[in-house]
Amino acid sequence: MNEYLYEVATRLVAFDTVSAKSDRDAMEYITSQLAPLGFKTAIQPIELFGVSQANLVAWVGPPRADGKLPKPSKGVTGEFYRFQRRFLYRN
């Protein structure tokens, strides 16, 4: 695993996100990591049994009428491209 992904994974498991506590800080951290990769994000705050929680929705690329994600542009390479191929296009 590359160093960056290891660091992100280490930080994520350090957040105490049990349902009795807020997960908002973890959602904000994930958002901060996705933004530089070109993702758009939306945090949807909710309250669950009196605890502040959040849903995170993340997407990449322009919206399409059919709801599908666009294929990567020609010439897109590197970590982000490998991420797209591995996780977004499993068809």
Image: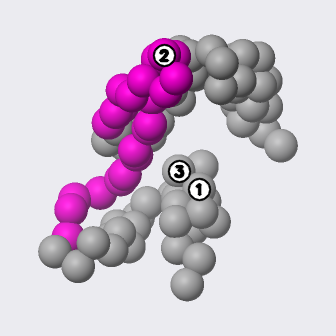
Badge nearest the viewer, 2 or 3: 2
Q: Circle 3 is placed at which residue position?
A: 80
User: Disc 2 and disc 3: Cα gap in Å?
Assistant: 38 Å
Do we see residue 69 in this rendering? Answer: yes
Residue drawn at point x = 33 percent, y = 74 percent? 68
- Numbered circle sitting on residue 7: none
Q: Secondary structure at mark 3?
A: helix
The correct choice, above or below, for 72 with respect to 42 in the image is below
Looking at the picture, the colour scheme in use is one colour
Mark 1 and mark 3 in contact? Answer it, CB < 8 Å.
yes
Q: Which residues are magenta?
A: 42-64
Residue drawn at point x = 16 percent, y = 74 percent? 65
- Mark 2 surroundings within 10 Å by alpha-carbon count, few (fewer than 14), some (14 through 19), many (20 or more): few
Give the percent coordinates (x, y) of residue 49. 52, 23
Say which label, 2 or 3, has the lower sequence index.
2
Residue furthest front as drawn: 49
Q: Circle 2 is placed at which residue position?
A: 50
Check residue 29 for magenta coloring: no
Residue drawn at point x = 63 percent, y = 66 percent? 86
User: Disc 1 and disc 2: Cα gap in Å?
Assistant: 36 Å
Badge nearest the viewer, 1 or 2: 2
Q: Based on the displayed image, in which of its 4 quarters is residue 90 positioned?
A: bottom right
The correct choice, above or below, for 66 with respect to 80 in the image is below
Q: Amino acid at mark 1?
A: Phe
Q: Amino acid at mark 2?
A: Gly
Q: Secondary structure at mark 2?
A: loop
The correct choice, above or below, for 91 with respect to 8 in the image is below
